Amino acid sequence: MSEHGLHLIDDCLSEDWVDAWAADVVRQIEDYLGKHAAFEAFLGEDD
């Protein structure tokens, strides 16, 4: 992506765009679940 926020369409149409997108989604889900687990552990410490 350029400094102006523009990108080449070739970047979106590359052969591995699905793999890159899926890897990013998996990372985001893992981060989300990690935060949930940490909060659950925090709540369970007072038991």
Image (cartoon, rainbow, N blue to C red):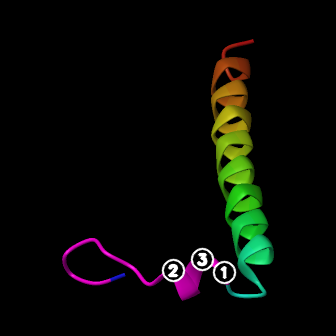
Q: Is residue 6 a member of the stretch shown in magenta?
A: yes
Q: Residue at x 63, y 40 (%)?
A: 35
Few, some or many residues within 10 Å of mark 2 (<14, 14–19, 20+):
few
Task: Specify the quadrant of the image occupied by residue 23.
Answer: bottom right
Disc 3 secondary structure class: helix
Residue 30 at x, y = what percent? 74, 52
Residue 12 image label? 3
Depth check: 21 or 6 in front? 6
Q: Magenta stretch: dominant SS?
A: loop
Instruction: Specify whether 46 is left or right of 6.
Output: right
Instruction: Specify whether 5 is left or right of 20.
Output: left
**Residue interval drawn in magenta:** 2-13
Q: Which residue is mark 1?
A: 13
Cβ atoms under marks 3 and 1 closer than 8 Å: yes
Task: Specify the quadrant of the image occupied by residue 26.
Answer: bottom right
Q: Amino acid at mark 2?
A: Ile
Residue 38 image label? none
Q: Which residue is mark 2?
A: 9
